[in-house]
Image (cartoon, helix red, strand yellow):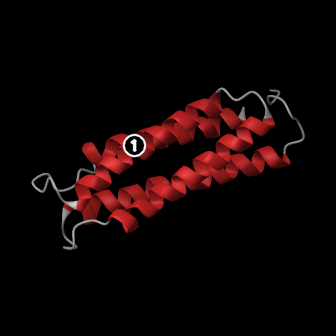
Amino acid sequence: MKRKVFSLLIAVLGLFIAIAPFTVLQPCVMMEGAACNFLAKTALLIGIIITVIGIGGVFASDKKTSIIVGFIALAAGIVEALTPTVIGACDMPDMACRVKTVPGIYVASIAVIVFSLVLIVTELFSGRSGEDVR
């Protein structure tokens, strides 16, 4: 049951990462070729990948698969957390991408990393190899 909960949380966070830069965490709309718009498009792609990984984890039936899902989600969360540093954002500190988009991506990515680590640790230290018994 724990693996399904953490996998579902990872999937929901991935969906948030994918959708938020185009809705509530939208970067500068007027600057189409700016780095912050590339940041939003990259977040969409990585967010979709994290969502698919999380959904896969919900349907994982054994311990090994769940651990693999956790490591893949961990790697995707780290990549997403590094995206604002690699791609960058606007230079002005009061622009929307610096105020909303980048911090939102950091928070959601760190949450994916934390839930992935919790999933991995709980699976590694659980005594059963199959689905959790209620």
Tell me which residue sits at (48%, 40%) in the image: 49
Residue projecting furthest to the left: 30
Tell me which residue sits at (77%, 47%) in the image: 122
Residue projecting furthest to the right: 127
Q: Which residue is mark 1?
A: 45
Image quadrant holding the N terminus, namely: top right
Tell me which residue sits at (53%, 50%) in the image: 76
* Circle 1 SS class: helix
Residue 30 horizontal/vertical position (percent): 9, 54
Residue 113 horizontal/vertical position (percent): 58, 55
- Residue 123 in view (yes/no): yes
Disc 1 residue crowd, few under 14, some 14–19, many 20+, Cα 10 Å = some
Left/right of residue 68 with respect to residue 110 in the rendered view: right
- Residue 23 in view (yes/no): no
Task: Tally the marks.
Answer: 1
Amino acid under disc 1: Leu
Quarter holding residue 102 = bottom left
Relative to the observer, which residue lies in front, 64 or 24? 64
Relative to the observer, which residue lies in front, 122 or 86? 86
Residue 16 horizontal/vertical position (percent): 40, 42
Left/right of residue 122 with respect to residue 23 in the rendered view: right
Quarter holding residue 114 = bottom right
Residue projecting furthest to the bottom: 92
Q: Looking at the image, is 88 positioned above or below residue 110?
A: below
Left/right of residue 29 with respect to residue 85 in the rendered view: left
Tell me which residue sits at (21%, 73%) in the image: 91
Q: Looking at the image, is 3 positioned above or below residue 121?
A: above
